[in-house]
Each structure stands twice: as C-alpha cells, then as structure tokens.
Amino acid sequence: MKMTFASADTERTVLYVSNSPDKKLADFLAASAWHAVHAKSTASAERMIERDNIKVGLVELPQDCTSQQLSALASCMRRPETNWVAQIAPGQADDELVSRFILDYCFDFVTRPWLNERLVFALGHAHGLSALRQAPATPEPSLGRHGMVGQCEAMQQLYRRIDKCGATEAPVFVAGESGTGKELTARAIHERSPRAGRPFVAINCAAIPPSLLQAELFGHERGAFTGALQRKIGRIESAHEGTLFLDEIGDMPHECQAVLLRFLQEGTIERLGGNGPIHVNVRVISATHVDLDKAVEEGRFRADLYHRLCVLRLVEPPLRERGGDIKLLANYALSMYKQDGARKLRGLSSDAIVAMSNYAWPGNVRELINCVRRAVVMSEGRFINASDLGLPETDNGPAVTLAEIRSKAEKDAIEHALQRHGYKLSEAAAELGISRATLYRLMHADRLHAEPSGGRASSAGAEGDSDADGDRERRAPTLMSASA
C-alpha cells in the first residue's frame, strides 16, 4: 500500500516501515517535501528498496519489541545503500536490545513526539549522506590492473612485466610465497597474449598423487591400467593452442620431471598405453613457492627442466612489502563479504588498519582476505576493530627516531671506512667524501677514539702535524667511555 503526498518528481523519497500507516506523519512529511511510501512488512520493504532504489528509510520500532521482531527488521536494513532513521518511544533507548539495534543498523533515531524539526533534520542528513555515496566528488582510485588489487611500486612493476610477457611465447616462471596470487598472474599473461580466448588449463602438481600425475598430464588410452575404462585426454592436450599453468611445479615428483622435459623439448606427448606421439601446441607457465635454485642444488629438481621453464621470471611481492596495498586489499575484501555479517558494517577502524599493517602476513593476500571475512562474521559493532581480526599481538620494540637512525648509520659508515683503509684517516675521509677535519669532528661527536682500545691515543693535532710526512696508519676506532 502506498501513501503518495506529492507529485513532483524532484521531491525526496522515504520508505516508512510500520504495522499500519500514520496519517499525521504522512501529512507532516508531505508538508516537508518528502515523497513517502509505506511498507507493512520487511519483505515488502526489501522489494521496494531493490525496485525503486530508495536511499532513506524510516522504521517505527514497536513499544515492546522482541529480539525476533528486531531480527526481522534487520533483514532488510543490512543493505548498505539505504540509511535508516528509527522512531522510538520515550525511554525505549534504555533497552539494551533496542540500543544495540539502533547502533548497528540505524543512521539516527528520533523520540516521540517526532512530528518536529528533529525528524526533518535526521531524514535530510540521511539523504545528504546517501547522495555523497551515490555521486563521489572525485572518481574512486583504480584498484589495480589485470584483475588484481594493488598500487604499490612492486605491483606496478609486476603489471609492466605481465604486459611484456604477454607479448611473447616464451615459457614464464612465477616465483612467490603461497597466497600471493601466482595463478592470477598466469591468467593475466594468458589474457594479454595471442592465445587469449583459447583454453587456460591449470593443474596443481602438489595436489595429485605421483602415481596419477602422468595420467593427468598426458592422458591415457582405454585399458592402459586397471580402472582405465575409456580414453582420457590429459591436461596438456586439453590446453592445445592455449596456455598450460603448472602450479607448485617445485613439488613435482622427480620421475615425472623427465617426461615433462621431453614434452617441452619436442612439443609432443604420448598418452599412457598409446603407441604414437601427439603434437601439442601449448604455452607453459609454471609457478611454485619452493626455492627452485636451492632445489636444483640439492638434486630435488632437474637443472635442465628448470632452465626450460624459467626463460622469463616474475616474482610476486609478499604482502608485508606492499605497504598501503594492505588497506586497499582489506577494504576490497570487506566489500566482497560484508553481506555475510549479521550487522550493517561501515568499514574498518583505524586500529584495525594499524594491526594489519604491523602483521607479517605469512599467508599473504589469501590470509588477509580470509581474516577480513572472519571478522565480518564475528564483529559486534558497526566497524571492524583490531580485536575482531584475531591477529597475534606483535612486539615492534621501542620506537626509534629518524635522528637516532641517522646517527647510527653515520657511526657505522665511519667505522667501516676506517677498517677498509687500514685505519688511515685521510683515505677514509676521501671515501666518505669529507675532509679530514670533518672526520675528526664526526668521530668526536660519535664518541669514537682515533685508535682501538689498548692502543696509544693520538690527537687531531698530531695527525695534522704529520701532513707533510703522509698519513700514519690508525687502528680500529672504539666507543669512548661515558666518562670520557
């Protein structure tokens, strides 16, 4: 049932949810230039929000509302595009259930009698906020390229290299820790190559038992082994004229590496139980979290296969080295999963961002997305805070000022320069790009002796007097005592 109070299309619309229409409220809203529609049930309200794109809602809470009634109302108030104002009776906000409901789902609330300027202000404020959300003053920044999220310099470099790899047919090896998005990179290379539109076939070499891996890769003929009731096309053959992505190649059994090498060299395969070679045109992209250089040294991975796979090499940056991308990824994950929670979330609190920035993320992007998704479900407020994330506490040690960092670096540079030049001060000063007098001054400021402990101290004047005779060798500088 609709209550229409004005015909002008330019007037604002408010969805009024209550058990029965209120004529006095209807007249008041019409006089205040609001176009009102009434919904008796939450199901009806949801349909109106979706159909008419309503941005402001007004909900009347029953005098003695139960948790079941509040849960039913919450079902249509979780939608982030609508700002809700609650109507309550005097003293009703003292009820813990009502106050929690208002905090979690409502933009504002008004108390009876509500036919006054307070209601007009609340509705106008809610409408203004929704207008800002609808039409941002500036375009939102790009989340990244190639279907990835990230704007840091390491990711920008990765994007450029993906473009370069897409323009060639050479095999690509993608290195990186687990959870950094190696398959996304492989798909991005495929989509920007001449093979785009052709099959992209991925196989996880660590997820298939060694006894079955060859059959998965190369296929088999009927009767090739017990249980082979019909011919099966392998993954390599399925990727003909497309791209084959070999994930976790570092975990491939040694006996399978030889047959894969043969395919890479000759471009042909032979199904298990078959009697002839089959030519296959496939571009190979491989990836692993394993250090293949070390695996080759230890004999766990064939060097010749490694060189065949690693013609072009890309490295996925770990999340802990991506700086501001952590906040970008967290907000992206929140936008994907915020509907999973029982409450209408507004975002991430500042302490949650700090906690995520200080965490090392051993599971990288995969771990961060799962962490935010879990926090959406477990959060009890309008914002996800640090405790909702469940991250272990990190001890970053005492804070260090920039001046302290510079002082230590200066002292280390002086010590290392003196050691490299046999403690000849003139040569050390020349390497540091300063005069010998400046070096004396810095050594004094950094509380350094001109020779090691146990040796005879020499003064700046003694060194200056020896200028005609050349520099004398100095021993390693040492820290002066506090009493010096």
Image (tube, rainbow, N blue to C red):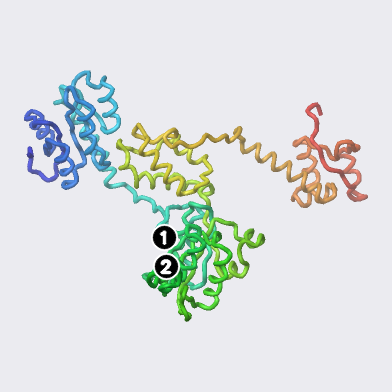
Compared to 186, does 142 lie above or below?
above
**Amino acid of disc 2:** Arg
Which mark is first along the chain, 1 or 2?
1
The residue positioned 66% from the left and 61% from the top of the image is: 297
**Amino acid of disc 1:** His
Compared to 210, does 68 lie above or below?
above
Which label was assigned to residue 192?
Answer: 2
Q: Residues within 10 Å of mark 1 (few under 14, many from 20)?
A: some
**Given contact means CB atoms under 8 Å apart, are the residues at marks 2 and 1 in contact?**
yes
Look at the image and tell me in which quarter the C terminus lies. Answer: top right
x and y percentages locating residue 98 in the rendered image: 25, 25
- The one of 134 and 357 positioned closer to us in this rendering: 357
Question: Can the viewer see residue 194?
Answer: no
Q: Which residue is mark 1?
A: 146
Real-space CA distance between mark 2 and mark 1, rounded to the nearest whole angstrom: 9 Å
x and y percentages locating residue 78 in the rendered image: 26, 39
x and y percentages locating residue 82 in the rendered image: 23, 40
Q: Residues within 10 Å of mark 2 (few under 14, many from 20)?
A: some
Residue 327 horizontal side relative to residue 437, left or right:
left
x and y percentages locating residue 413 in the rendered image: 73, 46
Question: Can the viewer see residue 467?
Answer: yes
